[in-house]
Amino acid sequence: MAAIGVQNSVIAFDDPFHSDACGRFMRTGEGRLFPSQEPAPAAEHYVDFLRGTLEADFLVQHVVPADAEIERFIDAAEGYGMPYILGNEFGNINGPHTAGTNRYDIPPRLVERAARGKAFRGLLYDETEHLQMHPGQYTGGGRLHQWLNPTGRNFAEAEEAFVESVRGFKERIGCEVWGEHVFPSLLHLFARGGFGLAPKLLKEEFQSVQLAVAMGAAKQYRRNLCYCVDLWGMDVGPWFTRLWGFPAHSPREFESALYLAHYTAPHGFFVENGDALMRSEGGKLRLTEFGEIFTGCRQKIKSLGLPYSIGDLTCRIAVVSADDGCFAKSGAFDGAGGFGFRHLPLDARNTELIDVLYALSHGSVSRLSLNQHKSELSVFPAAAFERAPENLKRLPLLRGAETESLVHPIFYPMNSVLVFDDQARYEDIETAEAVIVCGSRLSGGGRAAVAEAGRRGARIFAARHLNVRAEGLTEITDFAADLPAALGPLLGDRREWVIGYGRYDLAITNPSGDGKTLSFAVRNAPPRKKACSAHSAAGECGVST
């Protein structure tokens, strides 16, 4: 079973491990200091609540960027025996930044100190692809990127330099490092550089798109996968509200996300932030309605065994596409192109993956973006609530808004799809009945893999400009318009989101049609061309929630 964690507070109360410093640092990315809403609990009570009431397996601790505070946390967590991951979000927001970047790095000597203990589980780099593509974030207007700054590179050179920057850091730091992703971009390149992957669930994701990309990257590069179940976002409703837009997902949608995390079998997942799960009254913690859902799901998940693991991931449709560090056809938030560089403008080839995933989702996601940002679906009901001082004094609210909005559902259909980068090997795509090749370029290894798939009977659909040579080839000029008909029945049922695990399929549905209530069924997969690797169980499995 996946390890399940909780991230520390940002506005509910002063962090018990940093209580003297919280008032000096912004702890959200909204560009202002929000006062804590409730009194801080004692550290011992906080840890007891995390381990006892919430049954958290680990704590994601975004530390304030002050060395003495970090040392104090490391010693305290080790003393309590509380497994933890050190996160860099507060340092990204406040600085100091590593020279030439918009990235806060926890000092190596403190990482070494943490690694000498038994409780340390690694580092988390918050929304790291976002800060690469948006170099003005947290820099006061300067353009400093997270991992790679522009020096006249083209796309292929930028890709290689980016991977080498990530790989060099990973080798120097010498511990597990997770990259948290709000956009389904650069995941393959971080994985190639050695990072574990922490894609977000909820937030502003098209969920099937997010997982098709993240799971493909994890499979291709054999990396660990740990989800961030992120309750920040766009919607409002009559539920416990810390700040309009947090939580921005209903209790029912949150419950669906927790079960989604379980059934898709990652190595772990955690909830961002703990503020939504608990309240501090008189220094004592108690559960909110979201906390009650968390604990209820936690208990049920214990009894829900799975006959597969993340290592069994397979696909019937493989997408092969170069990663050019972009998520929208119109570029980054400021219009910059690949990797957040202004000198790498995007064209239709760089963004073909958006058209492919639009087609594979039965047109349920955006034609303009891989995320609700910069899409035709981007609406923010939460933005109607001004962050004025008089409004902030009313928070938290037991009912944030009288009526519920749902501009961001959690259900988007797709049929056993994984996305690989252009260096895919045949062993990555060998179970695919269809291989879709798109993007700005294709490596020699990728060409060989696609040709081998065609030789072994897969149908190949490739962009004409890539000059692919393979048996069973159909050249495509307009993926959004032409791919569904070309795929035929392999496109799947628009009422299902299917993820393949060798001899099993996970079928995710939304029977009520409300967009937020998921049902899960594990069933035998239809026969594939080639036998899959050994699995932990056989026969029919009919688990549902």
Image (cartoon, helix red, strand yellow):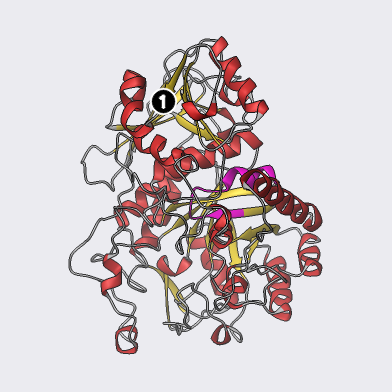
In the current view of this chain or complex, which residue is farthest to the left?
Answer: 403
Picture quadrant where residue 300 is located? top left
- Where's residue 453, x and y in %? 56, 16
Q: Is residue 242 left or right of residue 342?
A: left
Q: Residue at x 47, y 17 (%)?
A: 433
- Where's residue 518, x and y in %? 31, 42
**Looking at the image, residue 268 lies above or below residue 403:** above
Q: Nearer the viewer, residue 253 or 428?
A: 428
* Residue 544 visible in image: no
**Looking at the image, residue 200 lies above or below residue 402:** above
Q: Residue at x 55, y 52 (%)?
A: 338
Report which residue position mark 1 lands on: 476
| Helix, strand or loop at mark 1 | strand
Write the start and end of the magenta stretch as one range.
Answer: 179-193
- Where's residue 232, x and y in %? 40, 63
For the N terminus, the image quarter is top right
Q: Label 1 sits on what residue type?
A: Ile
Q: Is residue 1 left or right of residue 257?
A: right
- Where's residue 241, x and y in %? 32, 71
The question of residue 478 being in magenta is answered with no
Q: Residue at x 45, y 62 (%)?
A: 333
